Image: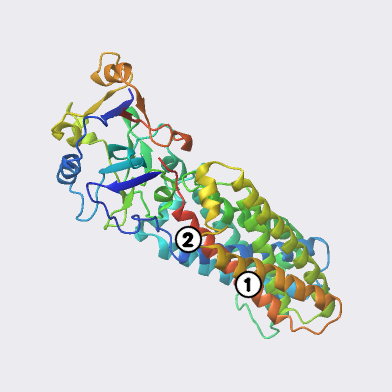
Amino acid sequence: MRYAMAIDTRKCVGCSDCVVACQTENDVPLGFCRDWVKEVVDGTYPNVSIELRSERCNHCANSPCVRCCPTGASHFEDGGIVLVEHNKCIGCGACIESCPYEARYSHPDGYVDKCTFCIHRVRQGSDPACVSVCPTRCMYFGDLEDPNSRLVNVLKNRKFKSLAPEAGTKPQIFYLL
Amino acid sequence: MKEELFVSGRNIPNIDPTLNIWHWQIPSYLFLGGLAAGILFFAGIFTIMGKEDKMAATVKKAPMLAPIALILGLFLLFMDLKHKLWFWQLYTTIRLESPMGWGAWVLMIMTPISLVWSASYMTELFPKWDWKFKILKTFEAWVIKNRILIAWPMVIYAVILGIYTGILLSAFNARPLWNTSILGPLFLVSGMSTGAAVILLISKDHKERKIMGKIDILLIVIELFFITHLFMGYKAGSEAQIDAVNLFLGGSFTAPFFAFVVVLGLIFPALLETMELRGYKIPIVVPAVLILLGGLIFRFLIVEAGQITRYLY
């Protein structure tokens, strides 16, 4: 099992519903967020292109945050989901420094927090909150090793990229182009 | 040209717009750790060479400062933790992949060694000192007899500690400025040079100063070579690395780096030390303090600048 996500940059309208859904579902403290929408403008006028990207933890297969955690609080769960065990985290900040996507933050209670792929929902068979709430249905969540999943299908038929693959992290969120 | 904008709004404290998770505590600790490593390295190596009496300040007096520096450093690291009461988990896990994990263990070994080392010289330096309990006196006698046995691990662990202060940073692939293997040796040499500066400040013996002065000049030359090498490596690197080094070659860190670290912290004190060796009368306090300040500022700049650098995507 290898959980992953594909996000269609051509369907995303940047409404930020995914962000609010996540904050509500996971009780994210005010002023923080586990996912966010980025607008990237490339080129110079009049030749500009625009890309909307809903970003979050990439649940990397080669996670620098898991590697550098001194207590083992950052760890892999089933399906490659990267999680932080709050009671093991000492708040040293090493994982925040090690993340090329700036997906982690220091929770006001002291421990480090980030996207969990809504593991509590996934274990019950539903999609993560951001995926299920998206009004344009631009996100696909699933198991990369299941050849019949919508995720695998959409990745077969579309061109896609991942973010900063040169960082060597093997990110598991794919952006459909 | 690429421009990024958070459409959903995002302004997380200490992360946006640029990462600033590690504040003054970390560079201060890196400085103190390097300093202690330098002092203990020289104390150990001269003991192994059998020069305890010729190099009295190096072997006996300066190491008194090492445990103070290490304990203060540990305290600063503790201050930096955001989930403080859970800190003990560092010592219930062994994670060899995590530089911070094995760094915590190295400190756990090095601090007691430095305490034992300086304690064993207490009665010699302060004749009125009394350990009171018999068991402490027996232990002291054993340590004094077996100093070389302690000096060897002390030298080895001093090198590991010195390199570790750099590797702590260089292990972060996500920060292009730190992600270079030369940072370990560079921090080691810089730490040794600050250690030598402290010994120069303490020593009253002309011959000892001469030896340490020569060593210090050599260390500074190596450090300058490493810094050049570091920049060359970045310049020939990927775009993220070129952007990172440009902070120091034209960007906002250029002036403080070249003024306080390269010129006032390395070249100028090296010149003063050379002139002193040639027989000019120069108060040793000047180059020594400049080297210490340069080392401290160097670590602040690298930690601060490294957090700004990132991958572009």
Gap in angstroms between the C-alphas marked 2 and 1: 19 Å
| Residue B304 numbered mark, or none | 2
- Residue drawn where x is 36% and y is 40% of the image: A42
Where in the figure is residue B306, as x and y percent of width and height?
A: 49, 55
Q: In which quarter of the image is residue A149?
A: top left
Rendering quarter of residue B140:
bottom right
Image quarter of the C terminus of chain B: top left
Q: Where is residue A144 in the image (x, y as percent from the top left)?
A: 32, 21
| Quarter of the figure with the N terminus of chain B | top left
Between B278 and A2, the one lying in front of the other is: B278
The residue sitting at 24% across, 52% down in the picture is: A32
Instruction: Say left or right for B273 vs A89.
Output: right
Quadrant position of residue B256: bottom right
The chain ID associated with circle 1 is B
Using a 10 Å C-alpha cutoff, classify the residue at mark 1 as few (fewer than 14 neighbours), some (14 to 19) or many (20 or more).
Answer: many
Compare residues A34 and B62 and report the one nearer the observer. A34
Q: What element carries label 2?
A: helix
Q: Name the residue under label 1.
A: B292
Mark sitting earlier along the chain (2/1): 1
Q: Is mark 1 on a helix, strand or loop?
A: helix
